[in-house]
Amino acid sequence: MRACPKCGQRIPSSERYCPYCGHMKNIPLPLDAYELGFIENFKHCVVHKYADFEGRASRSEYWHFMLVYQLIIAIILFICAAISCVTPVSGTTGVGLGLVVLFILSIGFIIPGVAVAVRRLHDLGWSGWPVLLGLIPFVGILAVLILMALPGKTAANRFGNPTGVEVITKQMAHKYGFIDATPSTPLTIVLIVVLVVLWLLVDWMLAN
């Protein structure tokens, strides 16, 4: 057992993360200071900050979380639609089964999704209440997306210090045990293209 250097709680020596505060051992700065890779960021939002409505979230934290989440949705629907194409099950039925799976997953992802959106608003210096605009069809959702895309405050505000300001290189990821490094712009573009292609394929398979 060892004491977490951030919160002081006793945790197993083999644990990379403190289950009480989410601190990652052996890194020189708090975990929130780093711009995490796609996998590490998604894990951070879903596991370590599942219902954390405090603090701040950078644009990269929010949008990387949303990109991975959308990829998960698209992959599940693609698999279901592909299975429907090679089995007697109709495409609509196959995607319907996929939607059932997604509904179950979405129940678990609602809380971390709202939490990271609230932290993103905190990054702007706002309270988290404007996230409720997302309940308004079209206009409200668009307003929230615009807010999520705005740059955060570069200095500390009443919600804490800026997050995601330190880049994780591949060497750092290997040294400190991060799952992946800060994603490059080309990688992000590739994943966005993959997401679009998956949705187009699902649409095509449904139409045929």
Image (cartoon, rainbow, N blue to C red):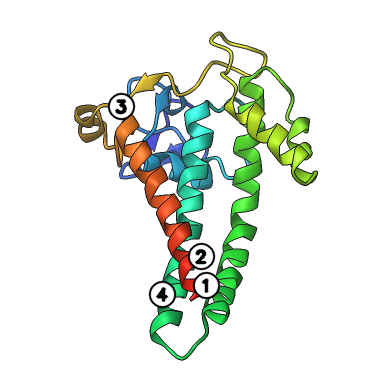
Please state if 49 lies on the left or on the right of 192 as rendered.
right
N-terminal-most mark, 3 or 2: 3
80 relative to 137, above or below: below
- Which one is nearer the viewer's eye here, 193 or 162? 193
- Which one is nearer the viewer's eye here, 109 or 198? 198
Residue 173 falls in which quadrant of the image?
Answer: top left
Q: What separation in Å lies between label 1 and label 3 (alpha carbons)?
A: 43 Å
Amino acid beneath label 4? Ala
For disc 4, the neighbor class at 10 Å (few under 14, some 14 to 19, many from 20) is some
Residue labelled with disc 4: 82
Residue 124 falls in which quadrant of the image?
Answer: top right
For disc 1, the neighbor class at 10 Å (few under 14, some 14 to 19, many from 20) is few
Please state if 180 lies on the left or on the right of 171 as rendered.
right
For disc 2, the neighbor class at 10 Å (few under 14, some 14 to 19, many from 20) is some
Q: What separation in Å lies between label 4 and label 3 (alpha carbons)?
A: 37 Å
Q: Secondary structure at mark 3?
A: loop
Residue labelled with disc 3: 168
Amino acid beneath label 3? Ile
Q: Which mark is residue 203?
A: 2
CB atoms at circles 1 and 2 under 8 Å apart? Answer: yes
Amino acid beneath label 1? Ala
Between disc 4 and disc 3, the foreground one is 4
Picture mark count: 4
Q: What separation in Å lies between label 2 and label 4 (alpha carbons)?
A: 11 Å
Q: Secondary structure at mark 4?
A: helix
Q: What separation in Å lies between label 1 and label 2 (alpha carbons)?
A: 6 Å
Can you give x and y, in whole percent of width and height, for residue 179 in the image? 30, 42
Q: Residue furthest bottom?
A: 88
Can you give x and y, in whole percent of width and height, for residue 114 in the image? 66, 42
